[in-house]
Image: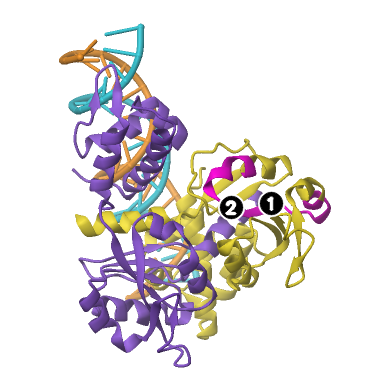
Chain colours: A yellow, B purple, C orange, D cyan
Amino acid sequence: MGISSGSIERLSIYLRILRELRREGKIDVPSRIVAERAGVSPATLRKDLSAFGSFGKNGIGYNVDQLIEEIESILGVDRRWKVALVGFGKLGQALIRYKAFSECGFDIAAIFEKDSALIGGDFEGIPILSNKKMPSVCEREGILLAIVAVPSEVAYEVFERCFDAGIRGILNFTDRTGFSPPPHAKILNVNISIEMESLSYFLKH
Amino acid sequence: MGISSGSIERLSIYLRILRELRREGKIDVPSRIVAERAGVSPATLRKDLSAFGSFGKNGIGYNVDQLIEEIESILGVDRRWKVALVGFGKLGQALIRYKAFSECGFDIAAIFEKDSALIGGDFEGIPILSNKKMPSVCEREGILLAIVAVPSEVAYEVFERCFDAGIRGILNFTDRTGFSPPPHAKILNVNISIEMESLSYFLKH
DNA sequence: TGTTGTGAAGGCGTTCACAGCC
DNA sequence: GGCTGTGAACGCCTTCACAACA
C-alpha cells in the first residue's frame, strides 16, 4: 500500500501530541483525543496508523507509551542522525543554534562553506570545512542528511555536490524547487518566502 | 471554482522562474519551459493560470513581462506588506536578518517579545515592544501578517493574542499545528523538525 | 457502551487529449 | 507546425459507516 507524504508528516505531529499526553500522565487515549489536538479527523489518524499495524485496543484506544515507541520506530527517530549543514550564512547560523533539531535526534556533525575565510575554523565545536571535503567527510562520519541554506543561485550545484557525496535526504531552504534528485534520494522544501506569498494571496481574496 | 493551496504555492514558484527567464532576456515562453524548471507538468501550469484568466497566446506561449505582472497581482505582491515578528529568540533573530523577506515585499515593522529586558530597545531600527501593545501597534501600522517564532509551549496563547490584535495571517514556526484560526484568518506551518523526520522516514524505508 | 480497523464512497487535484487558434 | 485552454478521465487521499471486539 502506498503511504502519502501527508500521512508521514501527521505521524510526526501525533508523536509530539502523544509525548505531551504522556507528560500529562495519560496511559491510554482514544483516537478522537489525539486527532482533535492534531486538527484531523479520528478516521484519518486510524488510517494513518493502520498502514503500519494494529496498535489500538477496542473500547480503550491506544497505549500512549507503546504508540510513541511504534511511531518513533516507523519514522526512524528511535536513533540519532548525523546531519551536514551546507552554507554558513545568516540562516545557517540560526539553524545551527536551533535546539529543536537535537531534541528530535538530529546532530549537526559538519558545516560546509564556500567562503575560504571561514574554512578551517569551527562553530561550537562543529568543524567548518571546504565543500571539497564533503564526499570523504560524509562517508567517514556516516552523514546521509543535509540542510542546504545557500544563496539560491548556487542551489542546484550544491544539490549535485551533496548527492555526489552520498547524501540521500536534503532539507532545502532555498527557493529553487524544481531539482530532480537521484532515484534513491529526496529533497524536501522549506520555503519561507513562498509561504508568505500564500498568506498574501489569502489576504487579498 | 476552488483554488488549491498547492496551486497558489506553484504560482510563487512560477513567478521566480519567470523573473529568472526575464533576466535571461526571454520575451515569450511556452508553458513547457516554465513547467520543466518548476518540476510540474505543462498541463498543471496551464490549469493553475486558467483559474485566473487567459494569459497565453496560441502558437507562442506566455509573454514573460505580462505574466509576471499578472501573477504578482494574483498573489497580492504588487505592493509591500508590513509584518510583525513575534518572539525574538535565536530563530526570530535569524529571520529578521533573512533578506529574502524584504526582497519579496515583506517588511518587518515591529518585534513583539515577552522578555522585559529586551522591551523598549530596537533591532536595526525595528522597535522591540511588549505583547500588550500588539493591538494598538498593529492597527496603527496596518500590520495584518505575523511570523510566530516563540517556544512551542506558548504557541496557542500567542496565536490568540495575534488574532485579537487583528492579525489575519500567521507564519507559524512552532511545532503546534492543530490551532483553529478564526474564519477570516489563516495559519501556515513551517515546521523544520517535522520535515527532518519525514526525511528520516524516507531513508529508513 | 466505547473504540478500533477497514471496505466502500466521496471529493479533490492532476493528467490526458484534443478542439481551436495563430 | 506550435501552443493554449479545458472537459473528461484518472488516481489518490480523506471521510463515512459499520462489523468486530473488549
The vertical placement of C9 against A12, above or below, is above
Q: Look at the image and tell me in which quarter the C terminus of chain A lies.
A: bottom left
Residue ID for mark 2: A150
Q: CA distance from mark 2 to mark 1?
A: 9 Å
Q: Is residue A133 visible?
A: yes
Q: Residues within 10 Å of mark 1 (few under 14, many from 20)?
A: some
Count of numbered badges drawn on the protein? 2
Residue pointed to by mark 1: A114
Q: Based on the displayed image, in which of its 4 quarters is residue B190 positioned? A: bottom left
Residue drawn where x is 41% and y is 33% of the image: B21
Q: Chain of mark 1?
A: A
Task: Give the label on residue A163, or none.
Answer: none
Q: Residues within 10 Å of mark 2 (few under 14, many from 20)?
A: many
| Lower sequence index among marks 2 and 1 | 1
Residue A64 image position (x, y, % from top left): 54, 74
Q: Nearer the viewer, mark 2 or mark 1?
A: 1
* B63 is higher (above) or lower (below) than A170: above
Between C6 and A3, the one nearer to me in the picture: A3
User: Does residue B166 appear left or right of residue A194 in this picture?
Assistant: left
Three-letter code, disc 2 = Val
Q: Position of residue A1 (x, y in %)?
A: 52, 43
Please state the chain letter of the residue tagged with numbered disc 2 in the rendered image: A
**Contact (CB < 8 A) between labels 2 and 1?**
yes
Find residue B17 and report its horizontal and vertical position in percent. 41, 38
Please provide the residue range marked out in magenta. Answer: A137-158
At label 1, the amino acid type is Lys
| D7 displayed left or right of B61 | left
* B146 horizontally vs A90: left or right: left
Residue A13 on the magenta span: no
Where does residue B119 sit, x and y in percent of width and height?
42, 89
Residue B178 vs A187, above or below: the answer is below
